[in-house]
Image (cartoon, rainbow, N blue to C red):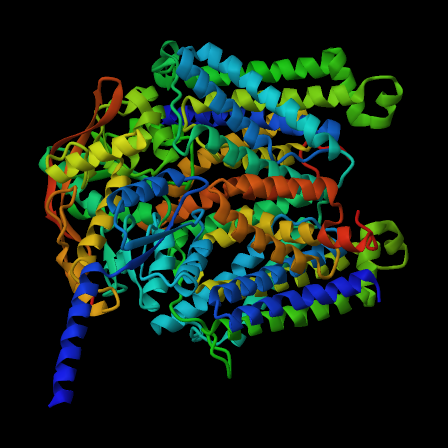
């Protein structure tokens, strides 16, 4: 395999990882601050994509579509936090898993009821379409570079938010000691709603960005949700830094595994069975990675304790 | 003397009654198809096509069930329809893996099964049954036709891509069976994969002139959008499943120019098809898909047999189905001895009609196409 | 007699009563549904040993359910095609005997549970939930892409396997088999919870340090519980495959794990008869709501939500009150 191809695949892995980070960041924040497992996070991703597709269809503007995705996902997040999620904070994980599983059912079929059973159309804006030439002679889709850029910017923004702002201090305090910040007179339920809406907005943004190059359809959030869980478990639940490292690791493993494993198996197997066995192992690779990490670090790479 | 007349009269009456029954016998049809969750669009189209063709036929009673695309649910619904609803004929399954579960269960209990989609090779060969009819295609048909067309139209080097599951690997085997050129790359992706950047990079790096792929549903939409954005300049071909009306709307202009093989297209020029397309649009307000066409043909076939024989007489009803005496929207249609179609497979190209992205026939890829598994079928 | 004991007797009687009434009315499909409920309840009873007794929230029990199913599928498909499973180093033939298949299903899933448990139990809390999910997903993707036994298409077994003295294709007789096993396992699980092992396991769930000071290792207790739990769920998988005469990778999917968990929670975590109540209720809902609307998942979701939010302790907890610690 040529060097150029390898670099291109690394970029692909990076782009995938950055996308996963947008999902994982919200998930890990919500877990870190509120101690909540939210299986319905993938539904918020879907809400973002559908809102973007609908608005892009009406107005033709991709920028407006992104705004709509952020707004719709944040609104949906705040709504379910107020109606359902806040009743779950002091429950055990089991109740949380079941309740948010129920939310998935409601969101998925509700969306199908609103938008029908067929996938929606959402395309990359003309200004960002097509490939550009990178130094070294690599032809790479501009839109994917933009995704990498946006993702890294958001990551920087989230780090800044947590390290430097008042909300960030409250979030960190909340992670450390929940009773304490309530005692300090901070409106904790408002903080929770805000964190949840922020996580939802990030998921919605991811849905809209990815929706432009993938299929906007019911159920699109579930595969991503599982991957995002893998990411935060690898990184250590509650840790934003862990989410970033975990995302990149998973993105690279998944992409490079799919590319490198089949030829690797080809070196000692028959070509035809090597492709199918190699692909089989590749599709299991991120789970193998996760089990490996947990064996050596039972609470993830950057997990507490 | 008196007695004999009585018997004669009675037998004539019975004969007459029997005849009348054969003309107007009621048939209860159980349709198990995918109406909820992912992939519901296909089941809804099959259902709508079937219902459209059966409209107004009071002798056809239809029971519809949703399999949620789960094989275990489909098998249980089969038991329900046969045991509780006492249906005579089953139909509706969309997916091969569900068909592999449902069809043997139905035929083992002595019920007819008409497949409006999905034709796994096992059911066309060793596992064929006198009671099982496939009104759509054997799974390999579109791929074999694609390979033939590619060989005859100057395509020399192809890159193959499909999900790593039986329908995917079988499809690519079908293409290779008839393709005479060189296969320069072959990739099997994860089922349900949505990002194809890695594969597109491999395609770019290969010296293939054409990409031939099968990625059903959302996978195909994702791939086409990303492929168009990558600037890779190669021909794209595939079976119709990734370029059907329900999907083209979501891909948009990125699909323009793609060649795909299909047994049906809305511009096939015959009276039955024109009526079908017009009626479907009038009834449901959208363009029909090939799944709708298959559902429509399935109902036409069933009604043609109902006019000739009573479903209670399995042998006669089977013979009536074998005749395939109906005006298919695909034009000529006949059954091979293994109860799978003999039909033309067309090559279509994705074009734009006004604002609507749709397909146009550019030629016949394989005329009177028949599958290769029939030789293993002993019935 | 406490309210819960009374309720348990009613719950225990519901399935056979339903099956018998359906038999009298000649509604074989209702018997099939009762059989499905009994088998899924069995899977739930298996999970409940880990979940309720041991406090181990496993989101990967589909792995054992699927292994049990494939034990049946692989053995029966070889018997069906008269090809041996393995010729070297020694000959293994396929089989159509349910008893042998159950044995293989139990042993395979117990061994898998031993391996998965030994690795997963090093973690706790959410990490445990997710690592069990990861093992389930691994097997799922393996089953989809491994071509030898049908891949995603799965395996069809044309005739149900044999049980000495019974006609397994007759719905009511197959129900009797499934329900008989459920009854035996319920009895065993009830004894297990009250035995020294069960008490120690419960104690380890509530306070691991205290158990350690008495000289017991919580890890070992939990591992044994996980293995028993996996074996029971594997047995349920083999029965489920026989019910459908079909196995496929969906048995391994995380939705299956989620559903088994739903049975347990709907009925009441840690309650012996919780999974029976949960599975019966779930099947009832699936078949009544499914007939009402194409979008029945919305109603199912709303209902589940209401149960979690307002009926803590599940069905049994709501009716019988809080007697079992639920933490």
Q: In which quarter of the image is the N terminus of chain B?
A: bottom left
Quarter of the rendering containing residue B261: top left
Q: Position of residue B344 (x, y in %)?
A: 12, 44
Residue C248 visible? The answer is no
Give left or right: position of C86 versus B231: right
Q: Where is residue B295 in the image (x, y as percent from the top left)?
A: 27, 45
Q: Which residue appears farthest toward the front when viewing the image?
A: B2
* Relative to B239, residue A202 above or below: above
Front-lying residue, C69 or A3: C69
Q: Where is residue A188 in the image (x, y as percent from the top left)?
A: 79, 21
Q: Which residue occupies 70% across, 56% down?
A: C50
Quarter of the rendering containing residue A226: top right
* Relative to A135, residue C261 above or below: below
Q: Which residue occupies 34% across, 33% down?
A: B220
Give left or right: position of A94 versus B126: right
Q: In which quarter of the image is the C terminus of chain B?
A: bottom left
Quarter of the rendering containing residue A243: top right
Residue B249 visible? The answer is yes
Q: Which residue occupies 47% across, 19% down?
A: A52
Front-lying residue, C47 or B3: B3
Q: Position of residue A113 (x, y in %)?
A: 47, 32
């Amino acid at each position: 395999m040529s060097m150029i191809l390898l670099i291109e695949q690394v970029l692909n892995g990076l782009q995938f990882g950055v996308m996963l980070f947008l999902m994982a960041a919200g998930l890990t924040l919500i877990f870190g601050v509120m101690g909540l497992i939210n299986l319905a996070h993938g539904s918020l991703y879907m809400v973002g994509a559908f809102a973007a597709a609908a608005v892009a269809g009406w107005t033709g503007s991709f920028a407006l579509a992104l705004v709509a995705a952020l707004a719709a996902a944040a609104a949906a997040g705040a709504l379910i936090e107020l109606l359902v999620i806040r009743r779950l904070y002091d429950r055990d994980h089991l109740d949380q898993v079941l309740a948010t599983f129920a939310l998935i059912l409601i969101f998925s079929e509700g969306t199908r009821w609103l938008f029908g059973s067929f996938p929606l159309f959402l395309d990359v804006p003309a200004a960002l379409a097509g490939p550009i030439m990178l130094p070294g002679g690599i032809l790479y889709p501009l839109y994917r570079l933009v995704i990498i850029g946006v993702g890294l910017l958001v990551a920087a923004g989230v780090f800044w938010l947590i390290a430097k702002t008042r909300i960030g201090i409250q979030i960190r305090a909340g992670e450390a000691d929940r009773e304490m910040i309530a005692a300090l007179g901070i409106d904790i339920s408002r903080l929770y709603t805000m964190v949840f809406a922020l996580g939802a907005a990030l998921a919605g943004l991811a849905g809209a960005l990815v929706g432009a190059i993938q299929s906007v359809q019911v159920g699109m959030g579930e595969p991503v949700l599982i991957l995002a869980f893998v990411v935060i478990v690898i990184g250590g639940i509650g840790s934003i830094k862990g989410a970033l490292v975990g995302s990149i690791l998973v993105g690279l493993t998944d992409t490079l595994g799919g590319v490198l494993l089949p030829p690797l198996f080809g070196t000692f197997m028959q070509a035809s069975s090597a492709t199918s066995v190699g692909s089989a192992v590749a599709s299991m690779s991120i789970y193998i990675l996760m089990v490996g990490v947990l064996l050596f670090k039972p609470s993830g790479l950057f997990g507490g304790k | 003397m008196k007695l004999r007349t009585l018997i004669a009269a009675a037998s004539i009456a019975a004969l007459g009654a029997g005849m009348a029954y054969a003309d107007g016998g009621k048939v209860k049809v159980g349709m198990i198809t995918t109406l909820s969750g992912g992939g519901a669009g296909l089941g809804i189209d099959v259902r709508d096509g079937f219902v459209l063709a059966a409209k107004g036929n009071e002798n056809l009673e239809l029971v519809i069930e949703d399999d949620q695309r789960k094989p275990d649910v489909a098998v249980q619904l089969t038991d329900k329809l046969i045991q509780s609803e006492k249906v005579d004929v089953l139909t509706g399954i969309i997916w091969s893996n569900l068909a592999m579960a449902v069809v043997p269960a139905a035929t083992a209990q002595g019920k007819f099964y008409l497949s409006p989609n999905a034709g796994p090779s096992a059911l066309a060969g060793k596992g064929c049954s006198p009671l099982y009819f496939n009104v759509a295609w054997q799974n390999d048909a579109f791929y074999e036709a694609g390979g033939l067309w590619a060989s005859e139209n100057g395509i020399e080097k192809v890159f193959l891509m499909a999900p790593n599951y039986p329908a995917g690997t079988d499809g690519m085997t079908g293409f290779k069976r008839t393709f005479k050129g060189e296969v320069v790359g072959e990739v099997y992706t994860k089922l349900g994969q949505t990002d194809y950047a890695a594969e597109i990079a491999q395609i770019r790096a290969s010296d293939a002139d054409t990409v031939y792929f099968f990625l059903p549903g959302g996978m195909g939409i994702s791939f086409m959008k990303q492929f168009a954005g990558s600037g890779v300049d190669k021909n794209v071909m595939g079976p119709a499943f990734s370029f059907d009306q329900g999907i083209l709307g979501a891909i948009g202009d990125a699909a323009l120019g793609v060649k795909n093989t299909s047994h049906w297209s809305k511009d096939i020029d015959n009276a039955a098809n024109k009526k079908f397309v017009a009626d479907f649009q009038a009834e449901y307000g959208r363009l029909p898909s090939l799944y709708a066409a298959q559902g429509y043909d399935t109902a036409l076939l069933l009604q043609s047999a109902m006019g000739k024989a009573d479903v209670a007489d399995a042998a006669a009803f089977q013979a009536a189905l074998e005749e395939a005496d109906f005006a298919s929207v695909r034009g000529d249609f006949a059954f091979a001895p293994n109860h799978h179609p003999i039909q033309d497979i067309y090559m279509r190209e994705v074009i734009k009609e006004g604002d609507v992205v749709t397909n146009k026939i550019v030629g016949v890829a394989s005329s009177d196409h028949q599958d290769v598994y029939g030789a293993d079928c002993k019935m | 007699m406490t309210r819960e004991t009374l309720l348990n007797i009613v719950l225990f009687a519901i399935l056979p009563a339903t099956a018998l009434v359906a038999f009298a009315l000649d509604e074989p499909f209702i018997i099939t549904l009762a059989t499905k409920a009994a088998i899924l309840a069995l899977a739930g009873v298996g999970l409940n040993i880990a979940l309720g007794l041991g406090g181990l929230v496993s989101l990967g029990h589909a792995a054992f359910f699927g292994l049990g199913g494939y034990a049946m599928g692989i053995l029966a498909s070889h018997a069906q095609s008269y090809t041996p499973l393995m010729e070297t180093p020694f000959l293994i033939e396929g089989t159509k005997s349910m008893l042998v298949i159950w044995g293989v299903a139990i042993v395979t899933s117990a061994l898998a549970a031993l391996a998965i448990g030994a690795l997963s139990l090093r973690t706790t809390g959410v990490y445990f939930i997710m690592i069990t999910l990861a093992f389930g997903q691994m097997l799922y993707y393996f089953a989809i892409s491994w071509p030898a036994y049908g891949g995603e298409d799965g395996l069809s077994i044309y005739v149900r396997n044999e049980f000495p003295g019974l006609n397994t294709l007759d719905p009511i007789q197959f129900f009797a088999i499934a329900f008989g096993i459920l009854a035996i396992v319920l009895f065993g699980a009830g004894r297990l919870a009250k035995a020294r092992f069960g008490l120690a396991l419960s104690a380890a769930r509530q306070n691991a340090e205290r158990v350690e000071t008495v000289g017991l290792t919580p890890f070992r207790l939990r591992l044994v519980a996980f293995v028993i739990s996996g074996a029971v769920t594997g047995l349920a998988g083999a029965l489920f495959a026989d019910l459908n005469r079909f196995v496929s990778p969906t048995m391994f999917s995380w939705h299956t794990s989620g559903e088994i968990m739903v049975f347990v929670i709907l009925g009441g975590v840690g309650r012996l008869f919780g999974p029976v109540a949960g599975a019966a209720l779930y099947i009832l809902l699936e078949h009544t709501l499914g007939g009402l609307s194409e979008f029945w998942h919305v109603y199912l979701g709303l209902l589940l939500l209401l149960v979690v939010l307002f009926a803590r302790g599940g069905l049994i907890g709501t009716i019988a009150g809080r007697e079992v610690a639920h933490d």
